Amino acid sequence: MKLFKNKLVSVIIVFFVFCFSSCAQINNHSKMRSTASKLIDYLKNCDTTNILALHDTSFTHIDKKNYRDFLAESIIKDCSFFNTVVNKYGMPDMDKIVFKKDSSRIIGTNILILPLTSRPDSNLNIKKCFIVLVFNPDKYFINHSRLLRYSINKEELVPNDFNNDKIETPDWLKKLQKKKN
């Protein structure tokens, strides 16, 4: 009977630990979802001050003025592109959020991915577009649940690697240029 009680107690302990860890993960997801919702609103209104305020300042140089100015410039570009996509395709569907862990790193940062559009658009030169929000790993998330960084990722229809320096002048044009000189 004593063996049965020990197994029962250990099963109950494991059950409560599992429930507690699941609740913590759900709470993390709700905080990340809330931050994503705020970011969407701030991007729509191009509110650089509040977008910068969403970022965690404990691990970055975001509190330094020159870095904040650099980020503000990139936020303005993101706002412009975001509003172009939203005006064409509507606001992103918050039910399509995907949560992931960054498995490429040991610390396992939390990642939220929100699709903006999955339709190809030749005018915008995109196959699909999504916002990626990166948060602290679980062990730091409780004290630092703010945004580490975000980006608007675009998968292009046609790679935009056109660079005049890479283009060689054809031989026939070189000969023509020599004749003129």
Image: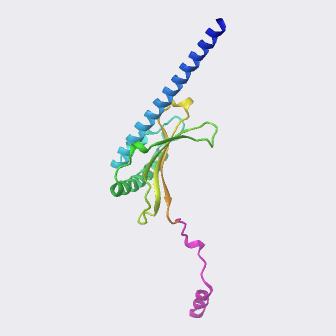
At x 42%, y 53%, the residue is 78
Which residue occupies the foreground of this view, 99 or 159? 99
**Observer-nearest of 23 and 108:** 23
Task: Determine if residue 113 is in view.
Answer: yes
Q: Position of residue 27 (x, y in %)?
A: 46, 29
Asked if residue 127 is positioned above or below residue 132 in the image, the reply reads below
Count of marks placed on residues: 0
Q: Residue at x 53, y 26 (%)?
A: 21
Asked if 9 appears above or below 41 in the picture, the reply is: above
Looking at the image, the residue that sits furthest to the top is: 1
Against 151, residue 155 (above or below) is below
Q: How is the image coloured?
A: rainbow
* 138 within the magenta span: no
The answer to whether residue 143 shows anywhere in this view is no
Residue 73 or residue 77, whichever sits in front: 77
- Decide whether residue 174 is among the magenta residues: yes
Which sits in the foreground, 34 or 59? 34
Q: Which residues are magenta?
A: 159-181
Q: x%, y% of residue 145?
A: 48, 33
The residue sitting at the bottom extreme is 179
Quarter of the figure that contains the N terminus: top right
Image location (x, y in percent) of residue 8: 59, 13
Q: Residue pushed farthest right? A: 3
Give the percent coordinates (x, y) of residue 110: 53, 38
Quarter of the figure that contains the C terminus: bottom right
